[in-house]
Amino acid sequence: MKTAFKFLVFSILMLTNFSIDAKEYKGAEYRTKEAFLYGRFEVNLKTSFIEGMLSSFFTYNDAGGGWNEIDIEILGRYTNDFQMNPITPGQVNHVGHYLMSSSPHADFHTYAFEWTPEYVSWFVDGVEVLRQTGAHIQTLNLPQKIMMNVWIPQYENWVGIFSPDVLPSFSYYDWVSYYSYTPGTGSYGSGNNFSHGWTDEFTEWDTTRWDKATHTFTGNDCDFIQENAVFNDGKLVLCLTNSTNIGYVDVKAPTILWARGTEGKVEVMFSEEVEEVSAETIQNYLIPDVTINSIELQSDLKTVILSVTGLNLNIPKNVIALSIKDRSPVPNIMGGTLKTIFMVPNPLTFPLKINCGGDSVLDFSSDQNWYYQTEYGYMDGDESAFVGQPFGGTDEDEVYQTEKYGMVTYRTRVPNGLYKVKLMFAENYFTSSGNRIFDVSIEQNKVLTNLDIYSLVGKNNAYEAEFDGINIQDGILDIYFAAKVNNAVISGIVITPDPNSVNENPDINKMDFRLEQNYPNPFNGMTKIDYSLSMPDNVSLQVYDILGEQIIFKDLGFHEAGSYSYLLDSKKYHQLNLHQVCIFIFLKLKQKRDS
C-alpha cells in the first residue's frame, strides 16, 4: 500500500540517518531531544499553501523497539483538509480526515492531540474532531519525540504535483506546548487529565530542548538542513527552498503556473499569493486579439479570473502577465511572463456519470486525476478492482466492481446552478460493521455522517445516496470524504442538472443578482464575497458599520452575467471594525434602480 511503504522508509532512514547525494530541494525538521510517553501535544500553526508538499506536527519513536508514531499532516494541495494518522507496529496506518471550515494556510490554527493508553484524539481550535480507541491504540506504548517538518513527498496521487516555481515556501509555528498525562490530578484537556509541562514560544533556538535535523529519506525529494529552520518575529519558520536561496528569504517574483480558457473567461494560476491591486490591473495582462474586460483575484490569492471577449477556444493563445507583485514584505515584481492557454472548447455534457476507480463501462466515463486540464477528477486515493464479482441491489455491477479508496476530494467543473448528485457505494472488503466509517460533504455541507456501508447493506451490495438542490456558485462541485475508521471509498458518481429544485429563499430567485454569505465570517484579515448577476450590469461594493455610516466604497466596474468573487482585505481599511460591519453589494442597474 502506498502510505505504508512511505512511512516504512521514513522510519528506517530516520534511525540510520545515513548520508546520500545532496538533493535539489531543501526542507527542515525540528525535533525534541526528549521523548515522551503519553500526554497532550499542541501547536499553533499556519501552513504552506503549495501543491506537492506538506507541513506536519507529530510524535515519533526513533529509538527502536517497534513502530510508534502519531501524525498531524496538512497538505498544501487542499484548502480545508486536516489529516490524522497513528501508525502502529507493523507499519499499520489508521488515517482519519477532518473537513475544516476555513483554510489552514490562510491563518493560524491550534492543533492538538491527546495520547493515552486508552485513546488518541485530535483537536482543531479546541474542538475534538476525531477519537480512536481499541487494540491498535494500546500498541502505542513507546516514548516518542515531538517533531515538525516540511518536505516534498514523491507520491503525486497523495500530495499533488510539485513545481519548483512555487519555491520558496514557508510554514509558521507560533508555539508548541506539552502536557503530561496525569489522570485524576490534572487541570487541562479532556477530563482535566493533563498537566502543563512546558510551552516554547519560539523566540530563539532552545538547544537544550530541540535539535534541527540534517537527514533525508527515500521518497522525500528534499534534504533537511539546519539553515531552513529559522526564528523570526517570535515564530519558528520551517522553509522549503531550492539549494541556492536557502533560509527565510524570498527573492523570487511570481510566475504563471498555468492558464485555462473557457467561454468568456481565462483562469490564471500564479506560483504564489499575489498582491490584489497589481493582480487586478488590466494593463498588466495581454492576450493578443482578445479584450480583457475585468479581473478578479480569488480567495486563494493565487488565482485570477479574467473576464474576456473575443476568445476563440479553437485557436491557441498565450496570456502575458507583467508587473504583478507578490506579498513578501519587500515585494518581488514579475517581469513579462508568457503561458499558453489551455483551451476547453467542449465542456461536460450531463448527466455526467463517473466510474470511480475504473475505466469506461456502460454509460459511465472513466476515472481520472484532477488537474487544470481535466473537467473532473479525484484528489488522492487508490484503485481496487473486483472483476467478476456480482453485486446485489443493482443492474450496474460493472460500476461497483471498481472503487476508489482513500478518498479525500472529488471535483467537477460545472456551470453555476442547481444539481442532483448520486453517490454509489459498496463494501467489498470488510465482513462486519464498524470497520469502515466516514463522513461525506458536498459543497461544505455534510450529507452523510458516520457512513458504515456494511451496516446498511452488507458486503457486495450496492448502496446509493442521492441529494437534490446542490447549489454551485463557483463553477466547481466539490465532494469531500472524511475517513474516521479506515479508508473512505466511492464506486460511482452521477451529476445531473436539477432545474426543478427551488432555492430556499424564493425572493432571491426573483432578483437580478444574488449575494452569498461572506466567508469566513467572522473574519480576521480577509473575507471572500461571492455574488452573481443574471444580466450584465455595473457593480459597486459598499460597506457600512452598525450605525449606518458608509466606511468603504469601491466601484467594481462593468460585469457580464455570471458569478464573481471579491476578496475584502481589512488591512487596507484601518477604520474597519471587523465586529461591527454589514456588507452589501449594490448594483447600479441600467433602469436606475438600486437593489
Image: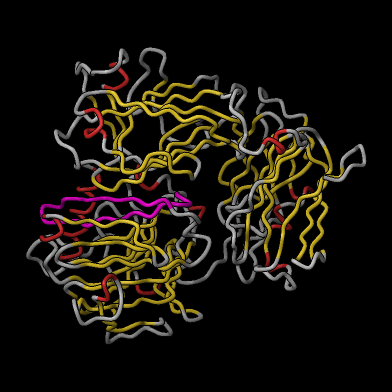
Taking the spot 30% from the left edge, 73% from the top edge, the residue there is: 189
Q: Nearer the viewer, residue 410 or 455?
A: 455
- Foreground residue among 51 and 78: 78
> Would residue 342 be found to the left or right of residue 585 on screen?
left
Confirm whether the magenta stretch covers residue 89.
yes
* Relative image position of residue 520 (x, y in whole percent): 57, 57
Position of residue 206 measured from the top left corner of the image (x, y, whole percent): 33, 85
Which residue extends farthest right? 592
Q: Is residue 594 magenta?
A: no
Q: Does residue 538 lie above or below 467 as drawn?
A: below
Residue 194 in the image: x percent, y percent? 25, 77
Residue at the location (27% across, 76% down)?
192
Query: As drawn, is 486 to the left or to the right of 135?
Result: right
Quadrant in which the N terminus is drawn: top left
Q: Quadrant of the C terminus?
A: top right
Q: Is residue 70 above or below residue 295?
A: below
Height in image: 210 above or below 16? below
- Residue situated in front as seen by the camera: 494 or 502: 502
The colour scheme used here is secondary structure
* Residue 240: quarter of image: bottom left
Whether 495 is drawn above or below 46: the answer is above
- Residue found at x 79% / y 40%: 559
**Percent x, y of residue 585:** 76, 50
Q: Is residue 128 left or right of residue 233?
A: left
Magenta part of the protein: which range?
78-99
Q: Can you tell which quarter of the image residue 325 is in?
A: bottom right
On the picture, is 340 further left or further right than 188? right
